[in-house]
Image (tube, rainbow, N blue to C red):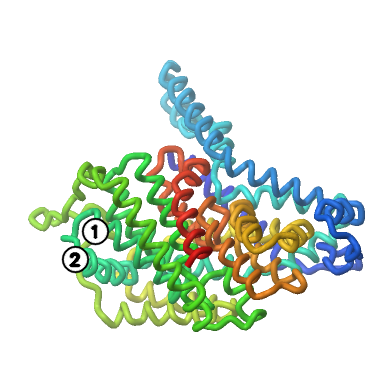
Amino acid sequence: MKSINRFKQILIVLLFIGGLNTLFASAAGNGDTIPKPLSSYNDGNLTGVTDILVNRIKEEPFNLVATLIFLLAIIHTFISGKFRAIAHDLEHHHKKKIEKKPKSKDVKYENENAVEEEVSFTAEIMHFLGEIEVVFGLWVLILIGSIFFYFDWHAAMDYISHKVNFTEPMFVVVIMALASTRPVLRLSEQSLEIVSRLGGGSAAAWWFSILTIGPILGSFITEPGAMTISAMLLANQFYKRKPSVKFAYATIGLLFVNISVGGTLSHFAAPPVLMVASKWNWDLTFMLTNYGWKAIIGIVTANTLYFLIFRNEFKKLSELPKWDVTKAVSIKWEERPDPIPTWVTLIHLFFLGWTVFTAHYPPLFIGGFLLFLGFAQATIHHQNRVDLKPPLLVGFFLAGLVIHGGLQGWWIAPVLGSLDEISLMLGATVLTAFNDNAAITYLSTLVPNFSDIMKYAVVAGAVTGGGLTVIANAPNPAGQSILSKYFELGVSPAKLALGAFIPTIIMGLAFMLL
């Protein structure tokens, strides 16, 4: 088992180092640059979307290549469960094969080959291909190879180094690591416990409190931070109680949708809002009066509906194991009940606030995070182990997504510009399921002559569809990373979409009708 884990770690490290090497590589020479500026297509005289897209493919055939690669990456995410199932079957077959193999009388020979025998290389490859967090990074390698083949190496390096903004993936890594620390989680849990007591402190009360208050906190501590805290609290207070598969998927779908709209109370916390706020002069008052109160109504309505649908299942949830004081044995180290000094919690909140405040300045929030790691080591007796693997995987996922997404503007912008208000909102909702919603809203800023009502519609649609897939909203990979262990063979994209479907409709109606 150690060898299997080591194999996974080596592959992850190699991919991450490769990503960093690409990120910091310097482009040289005067090769072609991509993507081609939308204003350079000279298609202002064309009115039909199909004519515009065909013309842009003729002028730059690589547009079609980049989009096909992106489409294949999306398909890969939807069939990732198949790879994991194949890996599981191969591991089972390999285990049976080892059990049937006669034991060697040569102890030395047997010990030397024990590690080799316990590992199925094919199974590990299938398992790796089934990890959603690495899918887009793997397809980035194919994309870079295609750019190199179609243009040259300098064009590929120029795009990665100068045309893609990696601030958001880096921010998510830091905020996810900070939000998952023991003092921050304990404070969040204690705060939500006060609310849950209104419902008797039951599993249902915890469920409703986390899914209501957690997403709204995203407007103040950012959506990635709210996702991390909400997902970890749901893991401790809900998923550990072993809900049914249907209830489990309904809950994670509801969480993703609520987080996506919960960040719209402010103009600085939700990635899709951040992309347009400064360009369209949207401030806190604008967000509260146009989006925030509608989002709250939608969240409460969706939670209430799911609560009523699954009310009988709350009674079937198992009880959580308790801390056994008499035996002085904890279930897990991170769940020990010893108190955390107030000053330690306050310093954690300071680092969390600093990261949010400097969210657009990577040298500042990364520097702050390095200082935090030193503080965490100095106060290790009050901490849990800072696990950087999940945040790094999520960051790698988002980095791959923004690399692919940056080459999709050639078709997204004209599609958005051709729609009326209702069609635009519905179109943005659907497109968000197949591309990061922040990319959708960013591309909408490139559409000329966008009226205020159209601006409202595209952002409303983008945040509404942010829970349909794991790639629809930047914080979703963080939530999936935390909760995937509670789903057999990982989170199924199709079942996730089904779980998020009804809340998505509710949010859409709230933004359209209220």
Decide: few, some or many residues near mark 1? Use Cα within 10 Å; few <14, some 14-19, many ≥20: some
Compare residues 161 and 483 and report the one nearer the observer: 483
75 to 183, vertically: above or below:
above
* In this rendering, position of residue 414 left or right of residue 374: right
320 to 276, vertically: above or below:
above
x%, y% of residue 205?
24, 58
x%, y% of residue 36?
84, 63
Which residue corresponds to the image point at 52% horizontal and 44% vertical from the top-left? Answer: 493
x%, y% of residue 494?
52, 41
Secondary element under disc 2, as helix, strand or loop, is: helix
The reply to whether residue 386 is visible in this rendering is no
The reply to whether residue 465 is visible in this rendering is yes
Which disc is residue 47 wearing?
none
174 to 424, vertically: above or below:
below
Q: Label 2 sits on what residue type?
A: Leu
First in residue order: circle 2 vs circle 1: 2
Dividing the picture into quadrants, the one containing residue 482 is bottom left
| Quadrant of the image containing the N terminus | top left
Mark 2 and mark 1 in contact? Answer it, CB < 8 Å.
yes
Decide: few, some or many residues near mark 2? Use Cα within 10 Å; few <14, some 14-19, many ≥20: few
Residue at mark 2 to residue at mark 1: CA–CA distance: 8 Å
User: Which residue corresponds to mark 1?
Assistant: 205
Secondary element under disc 1, as helix, strand or loop, is: helix
User: Which residue corresponds to mark 2?
Assistant: 198
Which residue corresponds to the image point at 50% horizontal and 82% vertical from the top-left? Answer: 284
* In this rendering, position of residue 372 left or right of residue 309: right
Q: Label 1 sits on what residue type?
A: Ala
Compare residues 438 and 356 and report the one nearer the observer: 438
